[in-house]
């Protein structure tokens, strides 16, 4: 099933908050753009759809997170040229695309060339702090990406070998394996 159809279906789900429905419209637009992008620039092979948290408070801003990645290491930042994730999900469920999916971002060292990274804002103190809106948007974008890349495995950051972080602070396998198949 195509990503757009899956999102249409999601929008018709009972009890879907109105704000999230609007977000899903935006997502559909993003997917159309991504599909075009994939075709036009010879999309890289996607093996992993990776879920993260920012490890910050819910109120951390997209701008602040982007600045932290960009800032040189000696100034307390990461000194990265590319963002850490392709998508960030705000506490209100708004999905912000930070980087084209045709290009790698910096989510998991050693696995970025084949990964698309999605993160919710939150996860402070290793807790799953997702709002209901974030859960809905996260499920929608992962379902959509999974429809685009059915071969890709859905993993949490902490599910990769040698990762000692708790990111994304919940069991991705338990939540998403059922959701997708
Ligand atoms: Zn992570």
Image (cartoon, grey):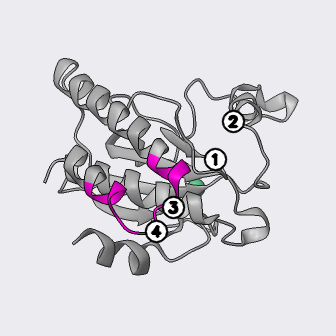
Q: Which one is in front in this view, the residue at disc 1 or the one at disc 4?
A: 4
Front-lying residue, 101 or 161: 101
Q: Look at the numbered discs 2 and 1 and tell me whether their residues touch, using CB distance below 8 Å.
A: yes
For mark 2, what is the residue? 62
Does the magenta segment cover residue 161? no
Q: Count residues near mark 3 (Cα–Cα under 10 Å), then give few for <14, some for 14-19, many for 20+.
A: many
For mark 3, what is the residue? 157
Q: Is mark 3 within 8 Å of ligand 1?
A: yes
Residue drawn at (22%, 40%), measured in percent from left and top?
A: 45
Instruction: Left or right? Give the position of 48 relative to 120.
Output: left
Which stretch appears magenta? Answer: 9-21
Q: Which one is in front in this view, the residue at disc 4 or the one at disc 2?
A: 4
For mark 1, what is the residue? 90
Residue drawn at (48%, 38%), measured in percent from left and top?
A: 86
Q: Look at the numbered discs 4 and 2 and tell me whether their residues touch, using CB distance below 8 Å.
A: no
Q: Look at the numbered discs 1 and 4 and tell me whether their residues touch, using CB distance below 8 Å.
A: no
Q: Secondary structure at mark 4?
A: loop
Q: In the rendered structure, find residue 15 and report the number of the disc placed on it.
A: 4
As measured in the structure, the alpha-carbon distance from the residue carrying label 2 to the one carrying label 1 is 8 Å
* N-terminal-most mark, 2 or 1: 2
* N-terminal-most mark, 4 or 2: 4
As measured in the structure, the alpha-carbon distance from the residue carrying label 3 to the one carrying label 2 is 20 Å
Figure quadrant, ligand 1: bottom right
């Amino acid at each position: 099933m195509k990503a757009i159809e899956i999102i249409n279906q999601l929008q018709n789900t009972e009890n879907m908050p109105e704000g999230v429905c609007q977000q899903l419209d935006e997502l559909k637009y993003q997917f159309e753009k991504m599909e075009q992008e994939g075709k036009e620039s010879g999309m890289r092979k996607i093996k992993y759809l990776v879920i993260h948290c920012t490890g910050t408070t819910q109120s951390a801003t997209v701008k602040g997170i982007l600045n932290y990645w960009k800032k040189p290491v000696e100034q307390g930042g990461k000194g990265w040229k590319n963002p850490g994730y392709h998508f960030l999900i705000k506490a209100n469920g708004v999905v912000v695309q930070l980087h084209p999916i045709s290009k790698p971002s910096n989510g998991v060292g050693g696995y970025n060339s084949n990964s698309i990274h999605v993160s919710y804002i939150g996860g402070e103190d290793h807790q799953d702090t997702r709002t209901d809106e974030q859960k809905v948007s996260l499920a929608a974008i992962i379902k959509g990406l999974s429809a685009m890349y059915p071969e890709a495995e859905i993993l949490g950051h902490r599910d990769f070998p040698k990762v000692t972080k708790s990111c994304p602070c919940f069991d991705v396998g338990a939540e998403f394996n059922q959701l997708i198949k």
